[in-house]
Amino acid sequence: MSIADLASCTYRPEKCVAIAHEAATLGEEVSGEVRLLTTSRTSAETVLLLRRFWSRLGFSPVFATDASETAALRS
């Protein structure tokens, strides 16, 4: 199920974001990029909060729009 599908089933779709990050193995330093999937309804406030949160944890947040939503909008 895509984040756009999940967001459409909630009362607060503007706060829905999917987080995709590969888990680190024990003893491995956790840092790098974290991919965050948004929808067309995700608010700017939510994006800003997540950008600050992941940056404080030492990650570089990269935002993208859910591909399944983009495909559905085109058809």
Image: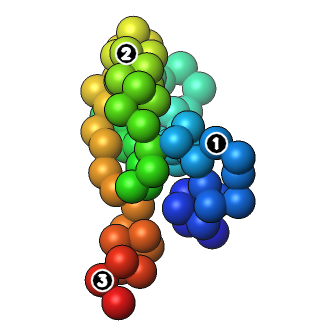
Give residue 44's position: percent from left, percent from top: 36, 32
Q: Seen from this angle, which residue lies furthest top? A: 56
Residue 54 visible here: no
Q: Nearer the viewer, residue 67 or 44?
A: 44
* Residue carrying label 1: 12
Nearer mark to the viewer, of 2 and 1: 1
Residue 60 position (above or below residue 5): above
- Type of the residue with mark 1: Arg
- Residue 67, image quadrant: bottom left
Residue drawn where x is 58% and y is 48% of the image: 13
Give residue 43's position: percent from left, percent from top: 42, 37
* Residue carrying label 3: 74
Using residue 42 as the reference point, say whether residue 6 is left or right of it: right
* Classed neighbour count for the residue bearing mark 3: other residues with Cα under 10 Å, few (<14), some (14–19), many (≥20): few
Residue drawn where x is 29% and y is 39% of the image: 62
* Residue carrying label 2: 52
Q: Earlier in the sequence, mark 1 or mark 3?
A: 1
Q: Earlier in the sequence, mark 2 or mark 3?
A: 2
| SS state under label 3 | helix
